[in-house]
Image (cartoon, rainbow, N blue to C red):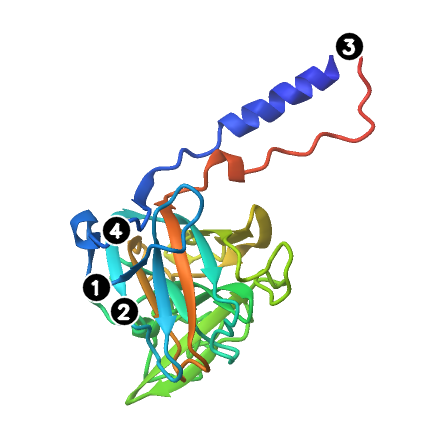
Amino acid sequence: MKILKYLALAAAVGSTSVQASVLIEEKFDDGALGSRGWYDNTNQVISRTEAVPGSTGSLQYTFRAGATTPTSGGAVRRKFKETDSIYLSYHIKYSSNWVGSGKPYHPHQFYFLTNLDSDYSGLASTHLTTYIEDNGGRLQLFIQDAQNIDQNRIGQDLTNITEARAVAGCNGSADGRPADCYRAGSQYRNGKIWKADVATFTNSRGPYYKADWHHVEAYVKLNSIVNGKGVADGVVKLWVDGKVILDRNDLLLRTGRHPQMRFNQLAIGPYIGDGSPVEQTFWIDNLTLATEPPAASIAPPSPPKHLRVGN
């Protein structure tokens, strides 16, 4: 029967999905982060009153009014096995008065660094920093690759000239997408953003109320390098509570200059550059990092419409 043949095909497609390798599992039930491989700043605040069902604690970040960093200070980091792709899953909740930065940029939340930078590298000046963060209630992917900038050719479009260039701004934009280029001291830095089209952390009570717990998932895959050149086939996919809110497969995150680039470091380091507008808090719980999304996140093909049952 044709319908049975289709169902068998759909099952086969699901069974061929890439097997995910779990890299980090963290429940934040206690403050012994250093014993589980976290480093740099393990003096983090663990809440005993806010947690998802079944959990006994969460990671708490409170900003005082005017502060650029939370009361726990700088970023906590964790190294993991090098990989071309990362899948991040976590639960998050905001205080009812949460306003974030109040600007079209920041707060930074999660950072991924690569094997081209050191264990204690600055987070914003690297060969590639990939951020997963919420700005104004909308999740976004933000990248910087300041260490790749040709500082002698600022503002020149090098995309069709050389692979020795930045992809996030200052040396052109291969996809034509707006990119930032700004001076930080004696050097230039850059930035490029892909933002979800819809807000998923809102002020109104309902499915996306910011003061309820929500499940966030993010998948990022580095682009290919073919014949020494970067190909714009990198992937980003974001989910909130199981709903896809951003899905792109045309990203350029590295050039042919760095074919060996791999993700290998996670940092959690909330930061509001202009200072927090108010005293506000958010919590993170049940974090998982893997190389691929679980099979449940990869939907099988939709069955064909008007299918007739027959031999």
Earlier in the chain: of badge 1 and badge 2, it is 1
Q: Is residue 215 above or below residue 99?
A: above
Which secondary structure lies at badge 2? loop
Q: Which residue is mark 4?
A: 30
Mark yes or no: residue 25 visible: yes
In x, y percent, where is residue 112? 34, 59
Question: Few, some or many C-alpha atoms within 10 Å of disc 2 (few <14, some 14-19, many ≥20)?
Answer: some
In x, y percent, where is residue 74? 26, 70
Earlier in the chain: of badge 3 and badge 4, it is 4
Q: Which residue is mark 1?
A: 43
**Mark 2 and mark 1 in contact (Cβ < 8 Å)?**
yes
Q: Residue 295 or 6: which is nearer the viewer? A: 295
Q: Which residue is mark 3?
A: 311
Earlier in the chain: of badge 2 and badge 3, it is 2
Residue type indicated by callout 1: Asn
Q: Nearer the viewer, mark 3 or mark 4?
A: 4
Q: Give the residue drawn at x 43%, y 82%.
A: 181
**Mark 3 and mark 1 in contact (Cβ < 8 Å)?**
no
Q: Which residue is mark 2?
A: 72
Question: Few, some or many C-alpha atoms within 10 Å of disc 1 (few <14, some 14-19, many ≥20)?
Answer: some
Q: Quadrant of the N terminus?
A: top right
Picture quarter containing residue 113? bottom left
Earlier in the chain: of badge 4 and badge 2, it is 4
What residue occupies the far top of the structure in this picture? 311
Q: Give the residue drawn at x 38%, y 47%.
A: 286
Question: Few, some or many C-alpha atoms within 10 Å of disc 3 (few <14, some 14-19, many ≥20)?
Answer: few
Residue type indicated by callout 3: Asn
In x, y percent, where is residue 209? 59, 60
Picture quarter containing residue 230? bottom left
Q: Report how far apart the C-alphas of labels 4 and 2 lie in the structure.
A: 15 Å
Q: Quadrant of the C terminus?
A: top right
